[in-house]
Image: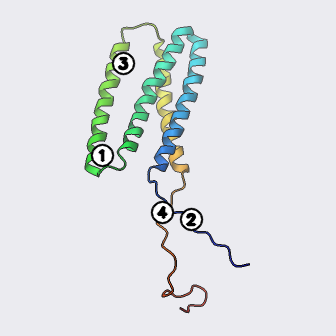
Amino acid sequence: MGPVTSTPEPFSDPTASLRRGVRYGVLGLLALAVIGAIVASLFSGLAGLWGALLGAAVGGGFILCTALAVLLTAKLPAITAGAVLLGSWLLKMILAITVLAILDPLDFYNRQAMVIVIVLSLVIVLGAETYGVLQTKVPYVTPAGPVSSTEPDAESGHR
C-alpha cells in the first residue's frame, strides 16, 4: 500500500467567512430578541415586549445591514464597493434617525427596554459576526499545482 496523500480543493469563495459571520449575527440577534422580549415582558408587560422587539429590530438591523452590504459588494470593483457602502451607511443613518423620530412621541413601548436591547444587540451581533469570521478556516496561500518532474525530489534531491 502506497502513501496516502490528499490535495485540498482550492478555496474558491472569498465571502465564506463573511457569510458565516452574518449567519452567526442573525442567530445571536434572534436569541437576544427572544430572551429580551421575555425578560422585558416580565418587567414591563406588553410595553416591554414591544420595546425589546423594536430594540432588536433597530440595533440588529443597523449592524446586519452593514455586513449584508459588504457581502453584496464583495465582487464589485473597490471604487464601486466603497461608493455603495458609503451610500448604504448614509441611508442607514437617515433610516435610524427617522425611525427613532417616529417612535419618540409614541407610548406603546417601553423606552428603557428598547435602549437596553439596542445596546445589547449591537454588542451581541458584532461579537457573533466577529466570532463567525474568526472561526472560518481560510488558507493564507493558494496551494501550488502538482509537482512537475523538473523539480528535485524532496527526499532524494534527484530529478
Give the amino acid at mark 3.
Leu
Q: In the rendered image of this protein, does residue 40 appear above or below residue 155?
A: above
Estimate how packed mark 3 is, as few (under 14), some (14 to 19) or many (20 or more) residues with alpha carbons within 10 Å: few
Q: Report the residue at 50% width, 63% height from top.
A: 10
Q: In front: mark 4 or mark 3?
A: 4
Name the element at disc 3. Answer: helix
Q: Report the residue at 53% width, 13% height from top.
A: 48
Q: Which mark is residue 140?
A: 4
Name the element at disc 4. Answer: loop
- Earlier in the chain: of badge 1 and badge 4, it is 1
Q: In the rendered image of this protein, does residue 154 appear above or below residue 72?
A: below
Disc 1 from disc 3: Cα separation? 28 Å
Q: Which mark is residue 8?
A: 2
Asked if labels 3 and 2 touch by Cβ distance under 8 angstroms, the answer is no
Disc 2 from disc 4: Cα separation? 13 Å
Asked if labels 3 and 4 touch by Cβ distance under 8 angstroms, the answer is no
Answer left or right for 36 relative to 84.
Answer: right
Name the element at disc 2. Answer: loop
Disc 2 from disc 3: Cα separation? 50 Å
Q: In front: mark 1 or mark 3?
A: 1
Q: Which mark is residue 81?
A: 1
Disc 1 from disc 2: Cα separation? 31 Å
Q: In the rendered image of this protein, does residue 141 appear above or below residue 97?
A: below
Disc 1 from disc 4: Cα separation? 23 Å
> Residue 158: x and y, percent?
55, 92
> Residue 116: x and y, percent?
49, 22
Estimate how packed mark 4 is, as few (under 14), some (14 to 19) or many (20 or more) residues with alpha carbons within 10 Å: few
